[in-house]
Image (cartoon, helix red, strand yellow):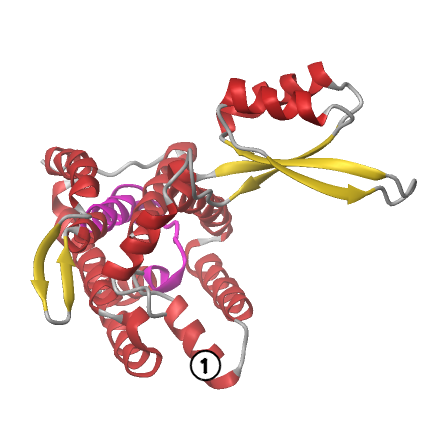
Amino acid sequence: MTTRPLLTAMLSLSFLRRFSRRVLLRTRWGDLTGRALYDVALIIVGGILMALSVDIFLDPNDVVPGGFTALAMFANRLWGWPVGLTLLALNVPFLLVGMRLLGVQFGPKTIFAAAFSALAIDILRPHVPTVQGEPLLYIAYGGLLYGLGMGLVFRANATSGGTEIPAKLMEHFRGTRMATSLLMMDVTILALAASLFGLAPALYALIAVWVMSRVIDAVEAGFDAGNMAYIITACPDTVRQAIMDQLGRGVTVMRGEGGYTGSERIMLFTAVSRRQIGALRGIVSAADPDAFMVISPSHEVLGEGFKPLTRVRRDKETSGQGDK
């Protein structure tokens, strides 16, 4: 019952992405574009995925995803409180304080994302099956769905609440780094999980959280991720021309000096997609087997051949993020 509307919503995202740059209404305060509808769709699909992860895979197996969701699961086991409503109750005061003190980043989208994802857990619970007895299944798919849902919410420039809010408040008032605060809270939550559910579910939770983090990174990078390549070669003209002709990528020529010899060296810089790394290696190897090349992943590549930079700036301005 739940898979059909979920599939429909996910298929609609491609249309909404194209629709997001259309101007729907012009006002004295600025243009209202389809970006708002696109962000709402991302939040809805992301919230549903997170709720399905909790209801089908994580909660039935006592595997906590961390954050306030874990605290809500603890309250459910101790006092029988609904997981979704408890999660919402935990988020509300921190959302209000964060919006009051820290401004636009705790705006309407974050409130909607936190409320929707929390309530979806209780709404969907009676209508979905559970997967138990197979740790590989419920850890892998639970972490995959939860991370995918969180990644979609992040792409909408929102958060689903959780421990990030008190961590931001601690950084604001006490100067404590967010990474330190989040680590302390995660360690405390895992210790509570081990005491309530046992050591095995707590260890499973560590694996699930790792899967979530990898999926979130992949979703945030999306199809705009790429790789940077720095090439020092004795045949720069041959390599440069081959990259432009065979890969269709631009090349920047930089002049430097060898640290050991002091002689002038030519270094080429280019950005390629993941699929083009093998071809780039072949081009450089064929032109100069003694070349020195460094390839490193890039979170996002903007410009010709990748995602247009002007579109990114326009999206941020229309979504209210350009003033941060």
Q: Residues within 10 Å of mark 1 (few under 14, many from 20)?
A: some
Judging depth in this view, the residue of 254 and 6 nearest the camera is: 254
Reading the image, the residue beneath label 1 is 172
Judging depth in this view, the residue of 139 and 191 nearest the camera is: 139
Judging depth in this view, the residue of 284 and 35 nearest the camera is: 284
Q: Quadrant of the C terminus?
A: bottom left
Q: Residue furthest bottom?
A: 173
**Which SS does the magenta portion mostly show?**
helix
SS of the residue at dot 1?
Answer: helix
Q: Residue at x 53, y 17 (%)?
A: 246
| Residue 279 visible to an observer of this rendering | yes
Task: Provide the residue span drawn in magenta.
Answer: 44-71
Q: Residue at x 19, y 37 (%)?
A: 10
Residue 27 image offset from top left, x and y in percent: 9, 67
Q: Residue at x 42, y 37 (%)?
A: 304
Residue 91 higher or lower than 285, as above or below: below
- Please identify the quarter of the rendering in which residue 172 is found: bottom left
Residue 41 higher or lower than 306, as above or below: below
